Amino acid sequence: MKRVITYGTFDLLHYGHIRLLKRAKELGDYLIVGVTADDFDKNRGKINVHQSLMERIEAVKSTGVADEIIIEEYEGQKIDDIRRYGIDIFTVGSDWEGKFDYLREYCEVKYLERTEGVSSSDIRTENRKIKIGFIGESEVVVKYARECEYVNGLEVAGTYTQNEKLEVNNRFLSFDDLLDNVEAIYLVSEPSKHYEQISKALFKGKHVLCEAPIALSVDEFNKLYQLAEENNCVLMDSIKTAYSTAFSRLLLLAKSGKIGKVISVDATATSLRDIEIEDIGQTWNSINAWGPTVLLPVFQLLGVNYNRKLIMSKMIDEEKSFDGFTKIDFVYDDAVAGVKVGKSVKSEGELIISGTNGYIYVPAPWWKTDYFEIRYENPTDNKRYFYQLDGEGIRYELVAFAKAIETRKSSDYIRIKDSKAICQVIEDYYNRKDFVELK
């Protein structure tokens, strides 16, 4: 029996895919099709895949051409698969001509002429694009707008900002004017403005991606999500860390028992920059700037039902509203957590997840890492994990936002209950609940 293998993403399966699969099958008696996993596609820079892995597998299966379907998950897997399955012929489209000649050492390699005039990339490009606008006063809006260039399905309509120093294209003169020209917005304005601006956008039927925290109280949070549901709009938290491959993978490893039972989560994020006292009203304080990021791994690993917490802050303004540093301790039934944030205090920005068998260590800056380690008592058992991170995770977040709009289903990278718990902590900070002020 002559065995043939081919690989592909097979996103938005079309006639060209089917024709290639049929021609591959004709080369032998048994065809194995490798469908690339979501994470592997990200690592190769293919972040605009519209369908999930299972959707793509089902599409290939429905053709009835493949005798067996496998998942391609890592670099170098093709050699392993050729050996494991006793492959006689490896084949792919001619657009990869010469790329896989190194496999000739293991089997015959054939490049098949691709079907001209049709491709998944063209189909994705032809799909209707969502016009998105940006609102905010910091360089972050420029960064997000720039990353949209790498995401199919989104088109930058322009920006509303009162910061004349920002170099933006198509500057809108008012928030209302921008809303009238977009279908979705990315919001990174000062957090006290979030509730009013998100409400206005949702009332007009606009989808919202908001830099966390979405609101400064749980009551406002609940009202916004109810409004989003009533208007059939997507409302999503923007914490780019949640969308990075490395962070998703370390969560899975921790939850799978790789380090035993998780007993402690410690996360730190600081940025030491000059803060002008007269501009404090327009500057994000430490709890708003970094709080959602450091709270995310705590709530995603230990849950939101902690028994008690203690917020400890060092204020740097006369109104006692701007925390230059905040530390929060959580106590659960069977675990603890501690987070530190600061804009006038510097510390090592690392994440440590401690378990009964070992611990996960993520070096600074952990919130945009492409690397982490699992460490054990015996150092020879330690493992290192590397994942490509494009655009600090912003690209992946924008892809998730576009897909959520398309399906009218919010992304599950950040659960609503986690977002709500973040708002609760920040509300307690402002209400001085479970709070100690450092002198």
Image (cartoon, rainbow, N blue to C red):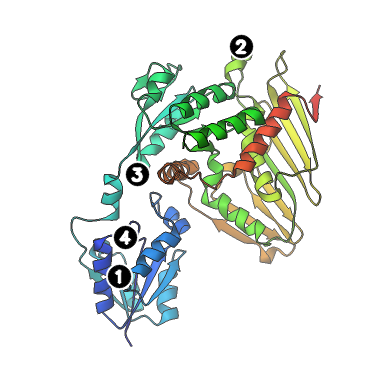
**What amino acid is labelled 2 in the image?**
Glu
Which secondary structure, mark 3? loop
Which of labels 2 and 4 is toward the front?
Answer: 4
Left of 329 or right of it: where is 15?
Answer: left
Res 222 quadrant in image: top right
**What amino acid is labelled 1 in the image?**
Asp
Task: Measure how far apart labels 4 and 3 are at the Cα level.
Answer: 17 Å
Task: Measure how far apart labels 1 and 2 are at the Cα level.
Answer: 64 Å
Which secondary structure, mark 1? helix
Residue at point 69% right, 19% down? 321
- Marker disc for residue 13: 4
Q: Is residue 140 above or below residue 398?
A: above
Measured as percent of width and height from the top left, residue 191 is found at 58, 25
Query: In the rendered image, which residue does mark 1 sit on?
Result: 101
**What amino acid is labelled 3 in the image?**
Asn
Query: In the rendered image, which residue does mark 3 sit on?
Result: 152
Q: Are marks 4 and 3 in contact (CB under 8 Å)?
A: no
Residue at point 62% right, 16% down? 280
Q: Is residue 171 above or below residue 358?
A: above
Q: Is residue 206 visible?
A: yes
Q: Residues within 10 Å of mark 2 (few under 14, many from 20)?
A: few
Badge 4 or badge 1: first in the primary sequence: 4
Badge 3 or badge 2: first in the primary sequence: 3
Task: Measure how far apart labels 2 and 4 are at the Cα level.
Answer: 57 Å
Which of labels 4 and 3 is toward the front?
Answer: 4
Left of 392 or right of it: where is 57?
Answer: left
Q: Residues within 10 Å of mark 1 (few under 14, many from 20)?
A: some
**What amino acid is labelled 4 in the image?**
Leu
Q: Are marks 3 and 2 in contact (CB under 8 Å)?
A: no
